Amino acid sequence: VQLQASGGGLVQPGGSLTISCVASGIDSSIKSMGWFRQTPGKEREFVAATRGTGGGTYHADSVKGRFTISRDNAKNTVYLQMNSLEPEDTAVYYCAAKTGQVILSALAMARMYDYWGQGTLVTVSS
């Protein structure tokens, strides 16, 4: 399984951006996908996740109401729509995929995931 994230860039505070992650070599064992972000010197931070079987989405409190994760299974793609962006949202955003079933809240833990993409940089600045 390979994950390719794209769509990052420079956006002004208050602006919007949608990033995407395409999974190749995917099979039915991939059940859930998530987004994390990381800034230099800090641990990787959970942003949002979507579970395959059974559905459901889960967003971190820091982005709830501003970010929305969605998934297009036909295209093996997961999206992160980001609105009302703040300078604190500046980070490298990574997508991740997990095989097997897990409860939704467990998807907030980076160690639960089996595959990671290379990251896409989002910079929020005027």
Image (cartoon, helix red, strand yellow):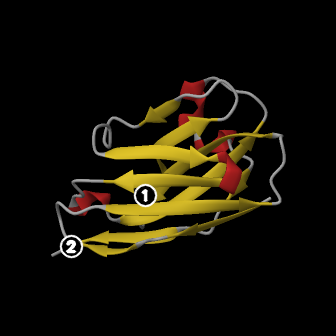
Q: Quadrant of residue 126?
A: bottom left
Give coordinates of residue 97: x percent, y percent: 68, 48
Does dot 2 land on a helix, a strand or a loop? loop
Q: Nearer the viewer, residue 71 or 92?
A: 71
State whether residue 99 is above or below residue 119. Answer: above
> Which residue is painted at 69% across and 44% down in the image?
113
Mark sitting earlier along the chain (2/1) = 1
Does dot 1 land on a helix, a strand or a loop? loop
Please state if 48 lies on the left or on the right of 86 as rendered. Answer: right
Query: Which residue is identified by label 1?
Result: 42
Q: Are marks 2 and 1 in contact (CB under 8 Å)?
A: no
Query: Which residue is identified by label 2?
Result: 125
Q: Quadrant of residue 117?
A: bottom right
Q: Nearer the viewer, residue 82 or 122?
A: 82
- Residue kind at label 1, given as amino acid type: Lys
> Which residue is painted at 22% across and 63% down in the image?
15
* Whether residue 15 is visible: yes
Callout 2 environment at 10 Å: few (<14), some (14 to 19), or many (20+)? some
Q: Quadrant of the N terminus?
A: bottom right
State whether residue 108 is above or below residue 35. Answer: above
